[in-house]
Image (cartoon, grey):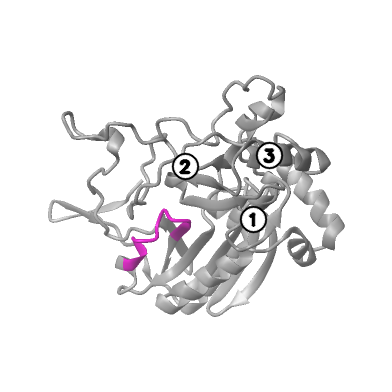
Amino acid sequence: MALFDLKDNRLEPAVLGRRATDADRSAVLAAVRRQITEVLRRPLLAIGWDQVVGGDALTALDAAGQVVTIEVIDALDSTALLLAMARATGAARSGRDQLASRYPGGLPAFERDLAAFRGSMPTGVEPGPRLTLLATEIADYVRPALGMIVGSGVELHELRVRSTEDGRALVDVEPLRTGVVDHAPDLNWRTAAPGAQTPETPLPEDATVPTPVVAQPSEPESGPQEDAPAAPSPAGAGNGHRLEAAALGAEPTIPSGQASEEALATIAQTIETPATLVWLRRRRGIDHRATLAADGTITIADGTSFRDPSAAANAAQNTQDIDGWRVWRVGVGGPSLRELLA
């Protein structure tokens, strides 16, 4: 709740204390680092902290198993922002072995704590921001540009620190307000005004449309989503809890291994190959393309090949526990690999 001062019969934002001392800012940054999960109110499995210019960077796993970076820094300017984004990109490419090598206690502790963390998380959790920044000072010239990346895998928090006469430090943690236009026009064709011209054939849910540069609305998204509960299985596709599970944070339709390879090879023999596989969720910024060869090999954009759809999806998104059978479709709006199971 906002706090105001009454001055000359007008409400003005209250400003408590005075500009924070360097010692108070340093102490606040250290406390935020120690209590990062409480500050962000977000479950995290911390992998390790690294010292960076002006602060510290944490590599962690979020509730969906996605590798994320959280930086707690004193001042955010254009250079600090670019370096943070570069570090987050590098961390997102970390594999299981790389994460385990950094984890206190090594691989055994990592496997044990990861299993406990996953077991405590609900199924179907969506990935959060890949990069979260918390800073006590933000350069004025950077603020307008920050509005272009909020909601695109980057989250920003401003730590407003004030020192009081009695030696206390007051901290206000607020999502950054950039001043970007809050009431941008809605370009979603689904909400077009009555009488507006629309295509003769409705666009599929997976169709590619320009990604807005404003923050996403907080209301639930309408229409079917790729990680929504599964539709009834097609004839012959089998049944059970795996087919009903969400695409994210769930075990795959067919576990990795020989059964998965054989099923994928069978699908490749029943369709025209090479076929383009598409994983598209426009509102989440996910747009991956891959190629399915006649021998059942999936090659993603970086040239890496897989014989399992879930492994290919995890590598493409730099995350874990994605049901590739659900998310990969043959062409935009085409059937998913799960729907093609014989």
Task: Judge from the rendering whether residue 22 lies leftward or rightward of residue 119; answer left or right.
Answer: left
Q: Is mark 3 on a helix, strand or loop?
A: helix
Of circles 3 and 1, which is in front? Answer: 3
The span picked out in magenta is: 145-156
Residue corresponding to mark 1: 299
Task: Judge from the rendering whether residue 125 lies leftward or rightward of residue 120; answer left or right.
Answer: left
Is 144 in the magenta?
no
Q: Mark 1 belongs to which amino acid?
A: Thr
Q: In which quarter of the image is the C terminus?
A: top right
Q: Where is residue 201 in the image (x, y as percent from the top left)?
A: 32, 31
Q: Can residue 73 be seen in this view?
A: yes
Residue corresponding to mark 2: 332
Q: Mark 3 belongs to which amino acid?
A: Gln
Total marks in image: 3
Q: How far apart are marks 2 and 3 (CA)?
A: 20 Å
Instruction: Depth check: give the residue in front, 259 or 242.
Output: 259
Q: Mark 2 belongs to which amino acid?
A: Val
Precedes in sequence: disc 3 or disc 1: 3
Of circles 2 and 3, which is in front? Answer: 3
Q: What element carries label 1?
A: strand
What number is the disc on residue 17? none
Instruction: Depth check: give the residue in front, 50 or 66.
Output: 66
